[in-house]
């Protein structure tokens, strides 16, 4: 599991974060996001991983100061990524705005862990919906 972080080692070493495991965890989350994005593209699914048709944009708290401060902490991490990975990383972070109210409730002290949980949960939802979609297509008669 920790070998995945080596793919983004320069980002890990340059991320200014007092807890050393956080950049490693973010590298793993980014890698899984990237793999999920590639997998959905290869299956011909054109939907964006950060969009959810069931949620309305007005339900998001885009003025969350706690989330904005947390995302600002990760600026150095994204700055050292290659352009393709940086775009994916920023797209992945934007998806966390769906859960900004939950991050606010947890407070500033737990904002990093809350961010990780929202990103992992969003990936889980996409994997679950993709597996349901693939399962449904396999059952269709030819």
Image: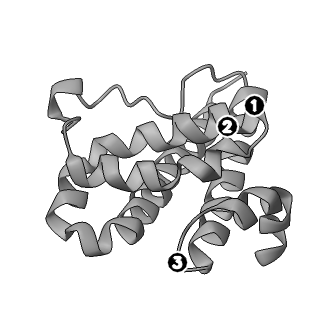
At 60% from the left edge and 62% from the top edge, which residue is drawn? 26
Q: Can residue 1 be spotted in the picture?
A: no
How far across and down, in percent of the image, does residue 139 sit? 62, 36
The front one of 108 and 117 is 108
Asked whether the beta carbons under mark 1 and mark 2 sit within 8 Å of each other, the answer is yes
Q: Position of residue 54 (x, y in %)?
A: 28, 30
The picture places residue 10, in percent across and down from the top left corner, at 80, 58
Q: Name which of mark 3 and mark 2 comes first in the sequence.
A: 3
The quarter in which the N terminus is drawn is: bottom right
* Front in this rendered view, residue 60 or 15: 15
- In the picture provided, is 114 more to the left or to the right than 64? right
Asked whether the residues under the numbered discs 3 and 1 touch, taking CB atoms below 8 Å apart as contact, a structural biologist would say no
Identify the residue position indicated by label 2 in the image: 86
Picture residue at 73% right of the left edge, 38% below the top:
85
Real-space CA distance between mark 3 and mark 2, rounded to the nearest whole angstrom: 22 Å
Element assignment for label 3: loop
The residue where tag 1 is placed is 83
Residue, disc 3: 18
- The image quadrant that residue 107 belongs to is bottom left
């Amino acid at each position: 599991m920790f070998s995945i972080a080596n793919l983004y080692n320069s980002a890990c070493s340059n991320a200014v974060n007092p807890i050393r495991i956080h950049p490693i965890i973010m590298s793993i989350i980014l890698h899984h996001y990237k793999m999920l994005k590639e997998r959905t593209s290869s299956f011909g699914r054109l939907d964006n991983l950060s969009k959810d048709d069931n949620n309305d944009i007005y339900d998001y708290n885009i003025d969350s100061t706690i989330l904005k401060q947390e995302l600002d902490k990760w600026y150095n991490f994204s700055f050292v990524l290659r352009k393709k990975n940086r775009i994916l990383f920023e797209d992945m972070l934007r998806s966390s705005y769906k859960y900004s109210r939950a991050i606010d409730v947890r407070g500033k002290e737990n904002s990093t862990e809350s961010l990780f949980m929202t990103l992992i949960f969003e990936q889980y939802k996409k994997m679950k919906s993709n597996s349901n979609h693939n399962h449904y297509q396999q059952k269709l008669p030819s």
